[in-house]
Amino acid sequence: MTSSRGVGIRANGWGWRHATRRSFVARDLSFEICPGERVLLLGASGAGKSTLLQALAGVLGADEGEQQGELLVDGQRAGGARGDVGLVLQDPDSQVVLARVGDDVAFGCENLGVPREEIWRRVDAALDAVGLDLPRSHPTSTLSGGQKQRLALAGVLAMHPRLLLLDEPTANLDPHGVVEVRRAVERTLEMTGATLVVVEHRVAVWRELIDRVIVLDAAGGVLADGARDDVLAVHSAPLAAAGVWSGFAPRVPARAAARRSPAPLLAASGLDIGRPVFGQRAPILVNSGIDLAVASGDAVVITGVNGSGKSTLALTLAGLIPPVGGELSALPALDRGAGIRPIRWKSRDLLTRVGVVFQDPEHQFLASTVRDELAVGPRALRLSAGEVSARVDEILQRLRLDHLAAANPFTLSGGEKRRLSVATALVTRPQLLVLDEPMFGQDARTWQELVDLLAELIDGGTAMVAVSHDAELARVLAADELHMTTQVVVSA
């Protein structure tokens, strides 16, 4: 490897608490990272991993919470060397700044004063490195979630940072994209000698690239810290208890007997789907000729390459965007008098028929506390106060969110936000669940608990259609798979 030009990091009793949360998200963190080290940051969902990365990048606002201890980057307070730090956030939407792909990647370089001719050389090299094979003029508004994730990484790589901070950068990528992004990061590190801190629940993705592991304890402090193989071998038991995926083998849930006569709910025939574009009347066609039938108790997992229209299909099936062509019909067991066209249903019609989880959980948050967020749907159904409270309490406990009932949804970790978004879909008890990347951000423990809950619902007659790159999800739920490619759909 080239001589290091990376930065060092020092944490001394550091912690952070959001203004609306009673307890610290992270606390009593003490460690040192040498220039050029490649560190995998592990820990249970909610242990403070994302918060630590944001603090290192200097993007935690002083008015947003309370800080304790000391956190230094290259010998100065975190945030003082922003031009040397590149951060890829969990939510790629939050890092899309400009309307065209090339301009968006160039944005960081422009702010650093990189010469114009050098900027465009870096832009093209970064786009190529992350496998985003699109012209510079391509509109960012038409990108899929996975493509936006590649775009965010390209923008950071083009800056040639001395400290590279990655927060689950491959979570929404197809398997080929995971390999491309990991290789792009590796090439960047070899070229620049930058320091790397990457957050990831699944150790296997980054295992061969990193040389050190730091595990945060959800109760505070550092649970383990050391050379990669030493930590993963010596601390295997506490890592498993903390939900780390290393060595974790997903358990197939115990299943009830198959339902004898499932009721047909939704049918698509020759369905053409398109992505709406702001400022344009006509959507952009992203896939066509899709045939799909969903009945009560069915489990379907939609897989495929980034940009093939998986999220667009999910939103179309859920009645939130109109089909471009073909047929999509709600059958009598689902329409129940609301009509056969889900796109024409009112919001209240959807509540007990279709529960939706968006790829970005923040897009569906409406209330200022977790408890009130979960009560939005039941109250819209005009349930009694007692029934609303009972449903909310049940789902809070089941998805390990009860200790966050009074917290603002936007202050939760990525994994906690995902569980809350799933909970908002479940609390109205719909017949059909349409879930976009429902397992994102989950540690091994919360992943298994969420899978067990979904299995119970499916066995009870709820239908599930889930968009996911998680190969284990379809296997453990014994789900049918719909594999999408560009303009082609293949049932598996």
Image (cartoon, helix red, strand yellow):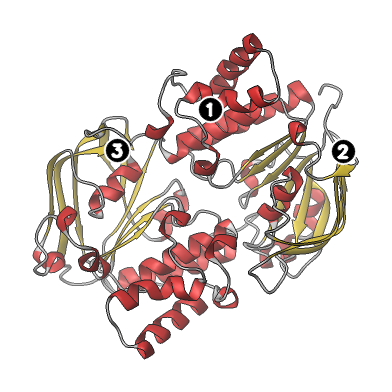
The residue positioned 44% from the left and 18% from the top of the image is 135
**Residue 16 in the image, given as x and y percentages of width and height:** 75, 61
Q: In this rendering, would 448 be left or right of 88?
A: left
Q: Is residue 345 above or below residue 384?
A: above
**Residue 489: x %, y % from top left:** 26, 37
Above/below status of 121 relative to 436: above
Of the numbered discs 1 and 3, the one sitting upstream in the chain is 1
Residue at the extreme bottom: 386
- Measure the alpha-carbon separation of dots 3 and 2: 44 Å
User: Badge 3, how many Cα within 10 Å: few under 14, some, many 20+?
Assistant: many
Dot 3 falls on a residue whose secondary structure is: strand
Q: Which residue is mark 1?
A: 104
Tell which of 375 and 290 is nearer to you. 375
Q: Nearer the viewer, residue 409 or 465?
A: 409
In 3D space, how far apart are the residues under numbered discs 2 and 1 (Cα atoms)?
Answer: 28 Å
Q: Residues within 10 Å of mark 2 (few under 14, many from 20)?
A: some
Whether residue 254 sits left or right of residue 3 in the image: it is left
Which residue is most to the front?
Answer: 63
Residue lying at 70% horizontally and 52% vertically, measured from the top left: 60
- For disc 2, the marked residue is 74
Sequence-earlier tag: 3 or 2: 2
Vertical side of 119 occupied by 24: above or below? below
Q: CA distance from mark 1 to mark 3?
A: 20 Å
Q: In the image as oriented, which residue stretches furthest toward the top?
A: 117
**Would residue 49 be visible to someone looking at this image?**
yes
186 vs 350, left or right, is right
Read off the residue under disc 3. 275
Tag 2 secondary structure: loop
